[in-house]
Amino acid sequence: MNVVMMGCGNPEMVDESQSVEVNGVITLDGKPLSNAEVTFLPADGDPLVGPALVITDNKGSYVMSVNAPRDYKVNVDRMMNGGPNPKLKEYQGEATTLSANVSEQNKTFNF
């Protein structure tokens, strides 16, 4: 008799129970930024945590879960005329000026 054991998790992966739900509002020039792509990327580049992405609603609001409490770099983008919005350039890629220190006590980030 052969027994095959299959596991669902990799012991090196982040424990799902560590996930934290974050929320906030994205504005540009004082107005809600609808349909914007908001990405939280682990500041230390940890591939086991990975990024989290969400699209804002028509009020610029977002809610999403990140995989673990920690520091994140935050990217915000919204396509304009088929390309990235130039007004959001400083909030994109590695050079983003936005960050979030996510913890159980710190879950709301308005940008």
Image (cartoon, grey):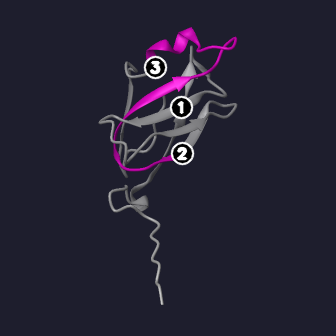
Disc 1 designates what residue? 38
Residue contact at pointers 1 and 2, CB within 8 angstroms = yes
Give the mark, 1 or 2, whose residue is nearer the N terminus: 1
Return the residue nearer the eye: 23 or 74: 74
Residue at image position (47%, 72%) is 6
Amino acid carrying label 3: it is: Tyr
Q: Secondary structure at mark 1?
A: strand
Q: CA distance from mark 1 to mark 2?
A: 10 Å
Question: Which residue matches tag 2?
Answer: 64
Q: Amino acid at mark 2?
A: Met
- Position of 22 compared to 62: left or right? left
Please report the bounds of the magenta region as a residue range. Answer: 65-90
Q: Residue at x 68, y 14 (%)?
A: 82
Residue in the foreground of this view, choosing between 10 and 110? 10
Which residue extends farthest front?
1
Q: Dot 3, crowdedness within 10 Å: few (<14), some or many (≥20)?
A: many
Residue pointed to by mark 3 = 91
Q: Left or right: 44 with respect to 90?
A: left
Cα separation, mark 1 vs mark 3, equals: 10 Å
- Amino acid type assigned to the residue bearing label 1 in the image: Val
Q: Are marks 1 and 3 in contact (CB under 8 Å)?
A: no
| Label 3 residue SS | helix
Q: Mark 2: few, some, or many residues within 10 Å (few <14, many ≥20)?
A: some
- Looking at the picture, does residue 83 appear above or below residue 72? above
Pinpoint residue 91: horizontal percent, then vertical percent: 46, 19
